[in-house]
Amino acid sequence: MLHAAELYFRELECPEIELYLVGLYNTTKEEEKTFEVTDKLFSATFMDGPFTLALFQEWVEKNGKFNDSDIVILLTSCRLYDYFWSTKQGRRDGGISYQDGICTHLRVGVVEDKGRDFDGIKSLISQIAHLLGTPWNEGHEAPDCLGKDGYLVSLDTSETPLPMLSNCTKDYLLQKYQTDVYSHPCWSDTPKPIVPRTHELPVHYFAEEDLCKANRPNFPNDTYCPKNHTRWGSAPVCKFPCCKDDNNYRPTYRSLPDGTNCTDENGENEGKVCLSQVCVTL
């Protein structure tokens, strides 16, 4: 997931973002009771984002296992709800964090990820950028970058989200770097990862796994439609069809995994890959 997240920062020339996994901790049920604030609605579990974030921050500080981490992210399968921005359908972007919290006692974030199809990547990127100091687009600190434009780190939920950062976000990250670089902040070092850095992307993972089954666990018999199926010809860019069997298509088109080679609307395919359902140039 980390290399995929780095691709969303690809347009940044200064600073250049590299992500390192320096630790991994599986919380117990008892530990989760100390910081998770949840509520059940039918079969879904909703998490109160602000309260959970505050309690998680206290738990991280007392735990002592995360002293080597610039940021600490709680991954959860619960649906996050942030009452500050309830118009975003319960923060469907799936995350919450403290602005400019990196390398401080507020270096924590919460990200919703089902653990099936890398659906938490965009939220992870937004929380990392927010922890680095960037404000939300269209918030009071960045009113000139409109959320409806669909960039990452936006308050508005666009129907066509873009896999890139707005100019506002890029400017704030540059300011952060220029302000802090000479004070040698913790985030500017090269830490020791617990696993080697790789260039693997979701597309490599799904070379061995069936994305139709992962994307829709309620339909365990679904699989990719045969390549000669008519639905492939009408599939939008960076989308693919799943079938109940060899002949019967199951709506709707699903998103191809990040890193899949693609051809854009102009017929160009050199150096093009899918990111967040958009065909981009790396």
Image: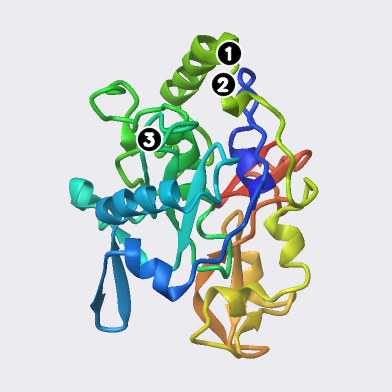
Three-letter residue code for mark 3:
Asp
* Residue 181, label in figure: 1
* Contact (Cβ within 8 Å) of mark 1 with mark 2: yes
Image quarter of the C terminus: top right
Task: Please tell me how crowded label 1 is: few (under 14), some (14-19), or many (20+) other residues with Cα within 10 Å.
Answer: some
Q: Earlier in the sequence, mark 3 or mark 1?
A: 3
Q: Hey, which quadrant is residue 117 in on the image? A: bottom right
Residue drawn at the location 39% of the way across and 37% of the way down:
106
Percent x, y for residue 251? 48, 76
Task: Please tell me how crowded label 2 is: few (under 14), some (14-19), or many (20+) other residues with Cα within 10 Å.
Answer: few
As measured in the structure, the alpha-carbon distance from the residue carrying label 3 to the one carrying label 1 is 31 Å
Above or below, 232 relative to 270: below
**Mark 2 lies on residue:** 185
Q: Is residue 236 left or right of residue 229?
A: left
Three-letter residue code for mark 1:
Val
Secondary structure at badge 2 equals loop
Residue drawn at the location 50% of the way across and 56% of the way down:
120
Q: Which of marks 3 and 1 is in front?
A: 1
Secondary structure at badge 1 equals helix
Residue drawn at the location 48% of the way across and 34% of the way down:
129
**Mark 3 lies on residue:** 149
Secondary structure at badge 3 equals helix
As measured in the structure, the alpha-carbon distance from the residue carrying label 3 to the one carrying label 2 is 32 Å
Percent x, y for residue 39? 24, 72
Three-letter residue code for mark 2:
Pro
